[in-house]
Image: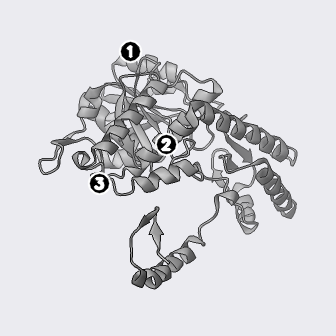
Amino acid sequence: MHVNYCGKKLITQEKTLLMDKVLKELESYLSKDIPYSRVLSSMCTNPHPVAVKAHCMFVRANLGDPGLFPGTFELEKKLISMLGNFFGNSNAVGYVSSGGTESNIQAIRAARNVYGKGNIVVPDSAHFSFLKVADLLGIEVKRAKLDDEYRVDVADVERLVDENTFAIVGIAGTTELGQVDDIKSLSKIAVERDIYLHVDAAFGGFVLPFLGYKDFDFRVKGVCSIAVDPHKMGLATIPAGVILFRKEEYLHSLSVETPYLTSTKQYTLTGTRPGTGVASAYAVLKHLGFDGLRKIVLECMRVTKILKEEVEALGLKPVIEPVTNVVCFECKACRVRELLMKEGWYVSTIRKPEAIRCVVMPHVTEETVSKFVDSLKRVLRAL
């Protein structure tokens, strides 16, 4: 018996027993991980089977030295072109990152390098990656208030922008509530003040276009960059994020010289960079197409509606009507989450207002919802 890795024979017969022992040890650790079937807190999901196969095919590729992997590099450029067109700019440039955090860091780093000032304005709903942005880049991050629907208060953004502001940020699919900021109004501020506008669509990028949203991407004049994560609703393997820039100037502002590699410059944040995310994201898009992804999103929204209605029937009020496949319910969240974990369910919590948060990813089926609601019913009775 031979042991295979990603379909390739790697070892000889005499090494099989030792390898089997190692793999069994790894399986014991893997078995401790929570299966997605019990998870309603994550914006990631089981990757599509074609993504897994593509991942294995490209497992040796290192895009940190693209001249050694010209096919993988060409595939990345093709993927970026596909996504640029999808988000309204056939001339968009960018690369496949490790995820939304890296993409957000790179967007603000590019803005700082081009505009050279001292602060940015983000919504109070912005992802915690902007705390890392502040720390790494040594800039001030001002937080704008939210309105009654938990979108950024555009008037407060205008109030906070000053002569040292070089960028503002809008969120298209907030992490906590899945809400969408008024990107068009933020664009107006950016254009009038001649500052950079970054849209964090790490989650919403592969959701909103299929729900009729068009005013959050490069079709909006002031948008300079977009972060989107194929490893979320794009069903790619982890890690697979994407940072897209409206024009090459922003991407080139990130470059450093790399004289000992096959390329003379590198504009990515990390050096060594896997080709697996490129291959898996591309494979899903080619296999399912955007129409296929639309069907998956619409099914998630159907299940989200069922979850909302069934939990409402238990007496819990949603914080807002779900905009995307995220729904939060007001309750004694920490205690409810604690009791749900004892039932084997994993949800998260938000603080303002206190609520449990459920993300209805493709692994959350109608049957999953039924079982979850039964457990929640018992939890609420216990409280």
> Mark 1, residues whose alpha carbon is within 10 Å: few (<14), some, or many (≥20)?
few
**Whole-percent x, y for residue 276 in the image:** 41, 51
Residue 302 seen anywhere in this rendered image of the structure: yes
Q: Which residue is mark 1?
A: 192
Question: Which residue shows up at 51% across the image and 47% down it?
Answer: 236
Q: Which residue is mark 3?
A: 272
**Whole-percent x, y for residue 102 in the image:** 38, 46
Of the residues tagged 2 and 3, which is closer to the observer?
2
Residue 99 seen anywhere in this rendered image of the structure: no
Q: Which residue is at the far left?
A: 259
**Tag 3: residue type?**
Thr
> In what element is the residue under mark 2?
helix
**Whole-percent x, y for residue 27 in the image:** 55, 74
Any mark on residue 283, and which?
Answer: 2
**Tag 2: residue type?**
Ala
| Residue sitting nearer the eye, 272 or 217 | 272
> In what element is the residue under mark 3?
loop
User: CA–CA distance between discs 1 and 3?
Assistant: 39 Å
User: Of callouts 2 and 3, which one flags the residue occurring earlier in the amino acid sequence?
Assistant: 3
Any mark on residue 293, and which?
Answer: none
**Tag 1: residue type?**
Glu
Q: Count up the numbered dots.
A: 3
Of the residues tagged 1 and 3, which is closer to the observer?
3
